[in-house]
Image (spheres, grey):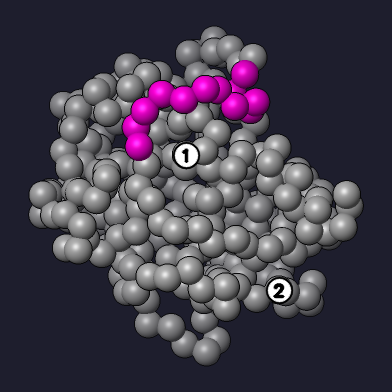
């Protein structure tokens, strides 16, 4: 799957979807530019802390609140993804606290304390184990060992598709254990974990049947009044860009978009 800049189109304000998952319309919706990079699956290693993770202390119940980028995504007019603080619990927890909340079939997101890695997604199997795509292989690992001190959260509700029953989620995940490289049809850990839970072919690389009127919109919510919208022809490309933005970090993205819009 090569990097194709023709997968993104600049939008006029009149072309943007009007629905917002919160039911509240924001101020002017501006258009950003996507930069496609080669796909990589994340390394689970230690890096230095970026700005948005510094000086954060746990709340009374042991969670952390981060200054992170929020998103909503639409397929045509339908909201298919929402990571907005006003609608969702975006707190992150220690692995010990997280395990006390997990059930088999849950989607987990491990949040990195690095500035150049997207979050890592996995399916919780039970008994402290996860199934996930890591370094070109579908693996089963101990959440304690693979997290390597990272924090995490349950993200079952971010995608708005109807979930499969938990036993089918686990069947999807377990049925692909051991697959490597060319046998794998997902580009990253998020696409694999989301496919296990929802079973939609759109999460697979090249799995979507594209039509002329099929459009996906990714809204990058940097603040209440600063929302940039990008358009894609497939869910695969939308996820790729969302993860690229996450890896860049909020401060760098704000700088990028200010340059694009001629503010600097």
Left or right relative to 63: residue 1: left
Left or right relative to 229: residue 138: left
Residue lying farthest to the right in this orientation:
263
Name the secondary structure under disc 1.
Answer: loop
From the image, which quarter does the N terminus lie in?
bottom left
Q: Residues within 10 Å of mark 2 (few under 14, many from 20)?
A: some
The dot on residue 207 is none
Task: Residue 143: give x, y in percent of width and height.
Answer: 25, 27
Q: Quadrant of residue 192?
A: bottom left
Residue underneath mark 1: 117
Residue drawn at x 19%, y 48% is: 138
Q: Is residue 126 magenta?
A: no
**Viewer-side label of 1, 2:** 1
Task: Residue 227: give x, y in percent of width and height.
Answer: 74, 54
227 and 257: which is toward the camera: 257
Residue drawn at x 25%, y 64% is: 185
Residue underneath mark 2: 10
**Magenta residue span:** 43-54
Residue drawn at x 20%, y 27% is: 142
Residue drawn at x 52%, y 89% is: 212
Task: Residue 241: give x, y in percent of width and height.
Answer: 53, 58
Left or right relative to 13: residue 43: left
Is residue 71 positioned above or below 54 on the image? below
């Amino acid at each position: 799957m090569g990097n194709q800049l023709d997968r993104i189109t600049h939008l006029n304000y009149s072309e943007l979807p009007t629905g917002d998952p919160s039911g509240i319309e924001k101020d002017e919706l501006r258009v950003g530019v996507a930069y496609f990079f080669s796909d990589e699956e994340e390394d689970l290693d230690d890096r230095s802390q970026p700005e948005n993770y510094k000086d954060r202390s746990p709340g009374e119940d042991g969670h952390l609140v981060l200054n992170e980028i929020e998103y909503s995504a639409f397929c045509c007019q339908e909201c298919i993804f929402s990571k907005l603080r006003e609608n969702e619990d975006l707190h992150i927890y220690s692995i010990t606290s997280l395990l006390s909340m997990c059930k088999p079939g849950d989607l987990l997101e491990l949040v990195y304390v690095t500035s150049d890695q997207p979050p890592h997604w996995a399916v919780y199997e039970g008994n402290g184990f996860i199934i996930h795509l890591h370094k070109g292989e579908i693996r089963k690992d101990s959440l304690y060992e693979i997290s390597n001190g990272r924090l995490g959260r349950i993200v079952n509700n971010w995608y708005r598709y109807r979930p499969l029953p938990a036993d089918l989620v686990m069947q999807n995940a377990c049925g692909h254990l051991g697959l490597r490289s060319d046998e794998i049809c997902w580009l990253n850990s998020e696409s694999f974990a989301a496919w296990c839970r929802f079973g939609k072919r759109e999460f697979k690389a090249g799995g979507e049947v594209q039509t002329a009127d099929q459009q996906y919109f990714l809204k990058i919510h940097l603040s209440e009044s600063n929302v940039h919208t990008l358009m894609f022809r497939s869910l695969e490309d939308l996820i790729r860009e969302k993860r690229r933005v996450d890896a860049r970090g909020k401060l760098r993205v704000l700088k990028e978009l200010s340059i694009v819009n001629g503010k600097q």
